[in-house]
Image (cartoon, rainbow, N blue to C red):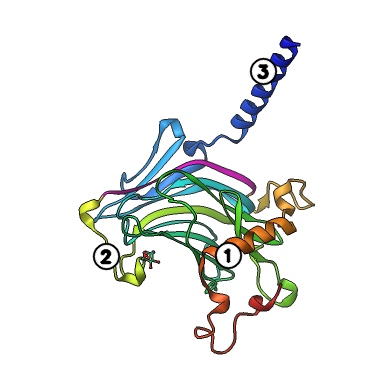
Amino acid sequence: MASSSSSLLASLLAFSLLNFIASATNFFQNCEVTWGNGRGQILNNGDLLTLSLDKTSGSGFQSKNEYLFAKIDTQIKLVPGNSAGTVTAYYLSSQGSTHDEIDFEFLGNLSGDPYILHTNVFTQGKGNREQQFYLWFDPTADFHKYSILWNPQHIIFLVDDTPIRDFKNHEKEGIAFPKDQAMRMYSSLWDAEDWATRGGLVKTDWSQAPFTASYRNFNEDACVWSSGSSSCGSGSNSQPWFSQELDSASQATMKAVQNKYMIYNYCTDKKRFPQGLPPECSLP
Ligand SMILES: *[C@@H]1O[C@H](CO)[C@@H](O)[C@H](O)[C@H]1NC(C)=O
């Protein structure tokens, strides 16, 4: 009895270790620091990546792969203390003037005041779909997981696996949806004291520099796009994320989070859209 349960335990351990290895992050393997002159660093054999910002420059990194649909997870620990004026961006984007883009941006604040999590979706060069949230935890105290699920029917933003936003494919109603341009993951830490904190009222305190954000456990479940073809092939795709959508319980959770933590929604900003709200705003 004892021996069979310990062998069960051993095989469970081996299984989870295998899983871990299969999805383990290695920033050296999957990403590259692209700017910042040494301010972005890959550490601990590739387990950790840090970006920093000082008066001279910010820094950034990107995924080596491009994707045509992906579920991207990253754990991020944001700039602690007085982070006013700083912006940590984490997004998927294609190239060019009619690019698609799926954005998470974290707007810093004075010590003890809340970060804003800013989200946006660009399709064919057109954005203006901002939704902003406060978080239900201090994002500087520890790592939290931020995920973008982009499949042919949905773009879902998740925080610690809780959905906060679901941008649906409404192509049938004539609304563009990103599905033809491959995107890459980008992240950067930069200064935007002109607008980031309380609309630019609170400036960056450079005596606190360098500001540092940390990343770990980057994971890409993706259809990798290379030389004009997708690693998923052209047929249907059996990976669960590819057809994932929110069931009714997850939709209820998302609604509750939005009710409690959303502080800006372009879909209710009638002043900004005097000609009428964008069409997706009135669709279910
Ligand atoms: C910063 O804190 C102020 C005061 O609580 C708040 O109004 C604002 O939304 C917070 N976040 C940012 C990024 O300005």
- Residue at 35% over, 69% down: 198
Residue in the image at 64% along x and 28% along y: 16
Mark 2 or mark 3: whose residue is earlier in sequence: 3
Part of the protein shown in magenta: 210-223
Work out whether residue 165 can be spotted. no
Picture quarter containing residue 68? bottom right
Q: Earlier in the sequence, mark 1 or mark 3?
A: 3
Amino acid bearing label 2:
Lys
Tell which circle, 1 or 2, labels the residue nearer the N-terminal end: 2
Labelled disc at residue 10: 3
Residue 108, given in percent of the width and then of the height, sits at 37, 59
Q: Is residue 53 left or right of residue 143?
A: left
Residue on which the image places disc 2: 203
Residue 49, position in %: x, y?
42, 41
Q: Is residue 107 magenta?
A: no
Instruction: Quickly name the residue at label 1.
Output: 258
